[in-house]
Image (cartoon, coloured by chain):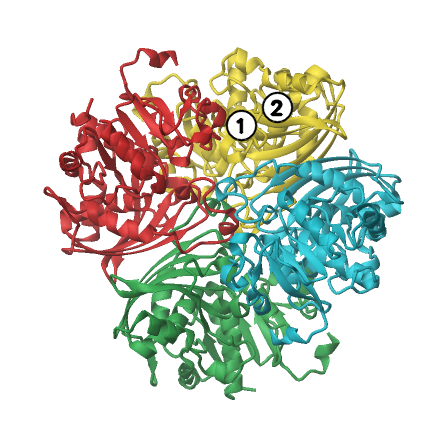
Chain colours: A cyan, B yellow, C red, D green
C-alpha cells in the first residue's frame, strides 16, 4: 500500500467491485500508470470488511495486494475519487451512476442503464471518439458537473470494432451476425452448468436487441444529437460452453465491391486515436487478421494484445450479402472493463476529465 | 440369434460397421420389423473376428446381442444381403459402393462419395421422394441391376427438413445459416478434446460447400435430370463442445410475406409420404415447433421423436431477410443412419427394392 | 388423464415437484404399475397453477402428460395421497416431512433431514431391508400413524451397493473413496458453469461427512437400535463437469483374502430381496461388473439397467488396502428418486404401507 | 533473430519440437537468460521447412519469433547444441536420446524411455538433486561423454513435490492417490472429445505403474545405486475434461503424528537448492498451501508461480491413513518441460554440464 500513499496517480473508485466485471476492473487497473484503485464499492452485505476477505477472487492471476487491503464501502459512502468505474448490474446501476455524475465525478459505466440515453455517449475509443462531445449536451441537460460515459454490451463491442474500418472504407449497408458467447458474460454464478455441459442455449435475454441498437448508435453520427447508422441488422445470440471469448459469425453488405484482399487490408491496417496517442491500454493493433482456415478460436486467440484486440478470421465471399468472416474477442477485457478503462484514458489524454 | 434364423425379414449388410455411424445403423436396425442385420463389414484388420469382440461400442445403450455374435467380414467378402447400408468414410466409399450396386444390391449410403452424382438421388424421405425416379436413369447409365441412393450431410439434413414446408407454402429465395455442430459428426476419434474444452472451432473442412450444394440439390427438381433449387445460400459451420445434436441459426427470405404464425403453422403441420405410409422409422411429426424462448437445446431436444425429428424454435421476424429461427436435430440418427434407414423403408414400401 | 380416473393404483404425492429430483420422481412414476402421481407440491410461488405451465422441465424425455395437467399445491394443502415422496431440500424438509408422517402417511424421503435420526431407517432395498423394522420404533417414539423412510445421499448409494456383497462374503474393515460427482447432484441452478468449464472443484460442502456416516449406518445393524458398521472410512469428494453419473475410485480392506476373481463373482452375482420379489423398479442385476480396462464411464454406463444398477470396473489388487475398483451409478435415478421408489415398492410388497 | 547472433547463451536443441511438450519447451525457453533455442528437431515429414510454417502452434501466447524462423531438422541431422531437451514420445525416444548422450551432449528428457534405467537419475530439482551423482555411474557404464537426465511423469511430479517435505520432517510410510488428469497430458490429438464431453475416463494406460515406481525412485536413495523409497503406494488415475492441471486427492501415513498445522507448515515453508541458488525457472515457493475450503482448482491455481508450483489445499485428518489433502499442478509446465529446464539449470549452476 505504501507505494500508493504518495503517488500522484488519479484515485478511482470501482462500483460493483465483487462481481466478474468488477474483478476485471481491479485486475486491469492494478499497475495502471495514470489511475490507482482507491475505493471499492459493493452491496451492503459486503460493506465494512477488507476486500481480500470477502471477495471470492475468480480470475486466474492473484488478487492484487493493494486492492486486497482496501475496505469495501457501501453505495451510500462518501467517495473521494473523481473518477469512477461502474460494473453494476443494469437493474441497479441507473440511480447510483446518476448520483456520481451529479456529484461532479466522471463515471465510466459498463452497465446497460444509460447506454441508449439520448445525451450519453456510447463510446468505443477507436470507433467514435467524437461522440464524447455529447458530454457537453448531457451536462447542460442535466445540470451536472460530472458526466456518464457508457460502453457497449460485450457482444456488440467486437462486432463494431470490426465493422468500423469497413464502414469507413466501403460503406456499410447490412449486417447479419450469429454469436457464440462465453459464460463469463453472464457473471457469477450466471449460467448453470446443467445448461452448458454437452449443450448450447440459443437465447440470451435482451441480447439481440442490445446488440442491434448499440451497434447502430456507435456507428451513427453525433452532431448535437445522435443519429443511428443507416444499416439493416439482424442478430442471433447463443450461449456456448466457453469461459471467455465471444465468437461471432458475420456477413455484411458493403456500399461498394472491394476485393477480399482490400477488405482484409482495411481491417488489418486499422488504427485510430488510442493508437496515435499511445494510450496505456490501447492495443497496438485493434484488429488482428488471421489467415489460418480454422481461426480465431477462443482458447487460442482471446488474449491477443492482452485481450484488447478483436481477432478476425475466415474472411471470404458471402454469396448472399457479399462478405463474411468470424470475429472473436475477450468479452470481459475489451468487451467490458478494458473498454471502460480505455475510454477514461482517452478522455484524460484529451483533457476532458473534471479533475 | 435363434430369433433370426427363421425370420422373414430382409437381410441387410452394414459397411463400415465399427465406426460411429455404423454403430448407429446397428442400433437402429436392432428390432426393425422389416430388416435384420445379417452381415457386418469393416476394414481388414477387424475382419474374421466376432463383432462383439472388436467393436468398442460407444453408444450408451448396450450392443444388440445378435450383432455382437456376427463375424466381421472384409470388403472383398461375398455378401448375401440384397440391401446394404454404407457408413463408409467418403474417401474409401466410392468404389466399394459402386460394386454393391453393380452386383444388384440396393445400396443406401451415408457417405459423400456419390451424393452429387448427376444420376444419384440425394433422398430425404419427407422432402423429395420423387427424386427416387433418378434410380432408373442411374441403372440405365451405368448398366446396373442394383442402385445407389444417398442421403445428405448431417448439417444439411435438418435445415432442408425445416425449409421444405416453407418452400412449398411460400416460396424460398434465400437462406443464411450458421451452424453449431456436435462432435459425433466427425466420428471417432474425430475432434481432439484439446480443440473442444473451453473452445469453439469456427471451421469444418468442406462442410459449408457440402451443406450448400446438397441443400440446393434436395430442394431442386428431377425431371430426367436434376435442377438445383434457385435459391441463394450462405453457410458458416462451427464445431462446438456438444456430443450429439446440431444447432443451426437460420434466416430466410421467402417468396411471399406470411404472418409469423402462418410460418409456424406450415412447419408444425408438415407431414409427408413417410407419415402417410406409417413407415417404421418415420417420426409422427417430422418437425416439432417449440415456443419456449430458449429452445431447442441439444440435451433437451435431440431425442425428440427418437431422434428422427427436426426441432424448430425462436421463430421470429428477421429485419434483414424476413424470418429467422433455430433448428436442431440429432446428427447421427436423423442426420445420418436414421435417414438412410427411412429411405430404404420408403423404397421398400413403394416396391422399388430389387428383391 | 382418463386413464387415471378409475385406476386402482395408489395415489402418491411428490413434495418439491419442480426441482431436479422432483422431476425425476415424476418421470420414474409416470407408468408405474402400482403407484400413480396424484398430487404435486411445491413452494408457494408456484402453487395454484398447472404443473405443465410452471415447471421448466429439464429432463430429455418429455414431461408426462398426466403430470402436466395437475395443479401445483402448496405445502399447507390438505393432501389425499397416503404415500408421499419427498424431494425437498434438507433445510426445509424436516418439519414438512414430519407432518406427513404424523398425518398417517408413508413418507419416502430423499432429503438429508432425517437420515441420521436414531429411529429412521436409512433404507437401501438390496442392502438393509431389515432396517425397515425401525419403523415400529419410530411410530412408538413419536406416536405417529405414518412413518418416514429415508434413502441415502447419492454418493453413498452406489458405494454401499458395491460394498454390501463384499461385507457379506469377506468382511469389510476399511474403505477409502474418492468421488468425481456429476453436477445434477447439486440440483438446478446448482453449480455455476464458470466452476465447471475446464475445471474440477475438489470440495462439496458436508458431502464427505454424509457419505461416511450414512455408509456406516446402512451397513450397520438394527436390533431395536442402530449400530453403525465397524469400518474405518475416508472420503474425498470432487465435482467434475459431468451431467449425470457419479464415478468413485474405491480401495477396500476386507476381512479375508479372496482371489480377485472371487471378489468379482461376489459383486456380479449379487441379488437381494428386490430381485427375488421382482419389484417393478428393481434392476435384474443390482451390480454390473465390466471387464474392459477403461470402464465404467458416465456417458456409457450411467443408464445401465435403466439407471438402477451400480457398475463396477477395474477391479484389481490394491498394494495398500488389498483391493481397488471403480464404481459408477446414476445419481438422480438409483442415487435419489429411483431408490425412494424402490423402497416404497419393497414396503408395499411386504405389506408395510399404512393403506 | 539478431539478438541471438552474438549472444553468449548456450545453444540448445529441442527434440520433438512440434508436439505439445515440445511447444512448451520453446515457450519456456523463449527469453531464457542462460539458454537459447538454436535447433528444432522433429520427424521427417516436417523436416526442411521453417518451424513457423509447419507447427500448428496450440499455446495461447504467440509462437516466439526467433523459433518461428528456425528450420526444422530431422533426427539424423548433425546437431551443434551441447544441451538437448527431449519431448519425444516414449516409444521412439530410447535410441535417439542415447545417441545424443554418446555424442557428448547433456540430454534432459521428458520421455519415459530411460526413467527407470538403473544409472539414469530421475531428477526433480527440489527433491533429489543428489541423484545427479548417478551421471558419473552412467558415463562409466556406458562410456559416454554426455549423459541422460530424466524427469518424471506429470502425475508423479506434483505428488512427489508435496511428499518430499513430509518425508523429510515426519517420515513417509504409505500413500494413496487418486488423480483427475488434464487432457494436455496425452498430447495432441490425444484424447478424443467424445471421451471427454460429459464424461470421465477412469483409466490411463500404464500411468498408475509409472506414477508408483517413479515416486519410489525419486524419493529413494542413491549411493552408487538407487534404492527405492520404502513406502507402500496405491494409485488410481482418471482423465477428466480439463485442459491443463492435474488434480490429485492424496492420503498419507506418516512416520510420526504431527498436528495438521505442523504438516501445513512443513509444506508451506519448503524450499530447496533451486530456491537457494535462485535458478531462473525456480518458483519462489515450490509448494503453495491454500486454506480456502474449495481450492486448489485447475482454472484458478494451475498458473501459480508461472506454473512451476504445486498447490496444496484441503489439508486435514484422514481417519484411515492419518492425513489427506489435494495437490494440483500444471502438467505441461512443472509437470513436463519446466521440470526439464529446471534440471538443466541446476546442473549448469553446479558446473555439471559438459560444456
Which of D261/B141 is in front?
Answer: D261
Q: Is residue A285 above or below residue B80?
A: below
Chain under callout 1: B
Say whether residue A31 is left or right of residue B20: right
Q: Quadrant of the N terminus of chain D?
A: bottom right
> Which of pointers 1 and 2 lies earlier in the amino acid sequence?
2
Which residue does the numbered mark 2 point to in the structure image?
B161
Which residue is at the far bottom? D351
Find the distance from the CA under tag 1 to the CA under tag 2. Answer: 10 Å
Q: Is residue C285 above or below residue D221?
A: above
Which of B178/C115 is in front?
Answer: C115
Q: Quadrant of the C terminus of chain D?
A: bottom right
Q: How many marks?
A: 2
Residue C183 in picture, x, y percent from top left: 43, 44
Which residue does the numbered mark 1 point to in the structure image?
B334
- What residue is at 72 percent from the left and 70 percent from the top? A9
What is the secondary structure assignment of the residue under circle 2? helix
Which of C40/A99 is in front?
Answer: A99
Amino acid at each position: 500500500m505504501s507505494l500508493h500513499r504518495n503517488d500522484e496517480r488519479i484515485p478511482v473508485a470501482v462500483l460493483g467491485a465483487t462481481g466478474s466485471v468488477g474483478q476485471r476492473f481491479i485486475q486491469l487497473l492494478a499497475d495502471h500508470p495514470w489511475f490507482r484503485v482507491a475505493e471499492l464499492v459493493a452491496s451492503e452485505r459486503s460493506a465494512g470488511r477488507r476486500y481480500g476477505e470477502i471477495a471470492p477472487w475468480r480470475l486466474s492471476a492473484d488478487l492484487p495486494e493493494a486492492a486486497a487491503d482496501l475496505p469495501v464501502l457501501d453505495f451510500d459512502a462518501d467517495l473521494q475519487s473523481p473518477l469512477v468505474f461502474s460494473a453494476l448490474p443494469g437493474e441497479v446501476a441507473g440511480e447510483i451512476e446518476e448520483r456520481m455524475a451529479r456529484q461532479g465525478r466522471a463515471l465510466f459505466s459498463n452497465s446497460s442503464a444509460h447506454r441508449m440515453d439520448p445525451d450519453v455517449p456510447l463510446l468505443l475509443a477507436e470507433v467514435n471518439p467524437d461522440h464524447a462531445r455529447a458530454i457537453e449536451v448531457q451536462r447542460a441537460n442535466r445540470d451536472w458537473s460530472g458526466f456518464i460515459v457508457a460502453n457497449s454490451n460485450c457482444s456488440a463491442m467486437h462486432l463494431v470494432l470490426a465493422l468500423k474500418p469497413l464502414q469507413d472504407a466501403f460503406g456499410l449497408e447490412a449486417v447479419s451476425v450469429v454469436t457464440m458467447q462465453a459464460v463469463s458474460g453472464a457473471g457469477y454464478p450466471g449460467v448453470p452448468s446443467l445448461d452448458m455441459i454437452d449443450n448450447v442455449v440459443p437465447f440470451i435475454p435482451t441480447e439481440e436487441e442490445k446488440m442491434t441498437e448499440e451497434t447502430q448508435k456507435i456507428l451513427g453520427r453525433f452532431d448535437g444529437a445522435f443519429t443511428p447508422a443507416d444499416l439493416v441488422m439482424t442478430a442471433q445470440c447463443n450461449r456456448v460452453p466457453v469461459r471467455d471469448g465471444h465468437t461471432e459469425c458475420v456477413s455484411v453488405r458493403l456500399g461498394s465491391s472491394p476485393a477480399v484482399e482490400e477488405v482484409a487490408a482495411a481491417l488489418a491496417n486499422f488504427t485510430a486515436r488510442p493508437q496515435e496517442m499511445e494510450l496505456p491500454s490501447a492495443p497496438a493493433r485493434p484488429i488482428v487478421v488471421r489467415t489460418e482456415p480454422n481461426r480465431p478460436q477462443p482458447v487460442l486467440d482471446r488474449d491477443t494484445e492482452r485481450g484488447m484486440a478483436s481477432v478476425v478470421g475466415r474472411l471470404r465471399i458471402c454469396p448472399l450479402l457479399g462478405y463474411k468472416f468470424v470475429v472473436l474477442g475477450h468479452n470481459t477485457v475489451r468487451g467490458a472493463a478494458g473498454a471502460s478503462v480505455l475510454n477514461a484514458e482517452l478522455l484524460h489524454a484529451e483533457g476532458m476529465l473534471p479533475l
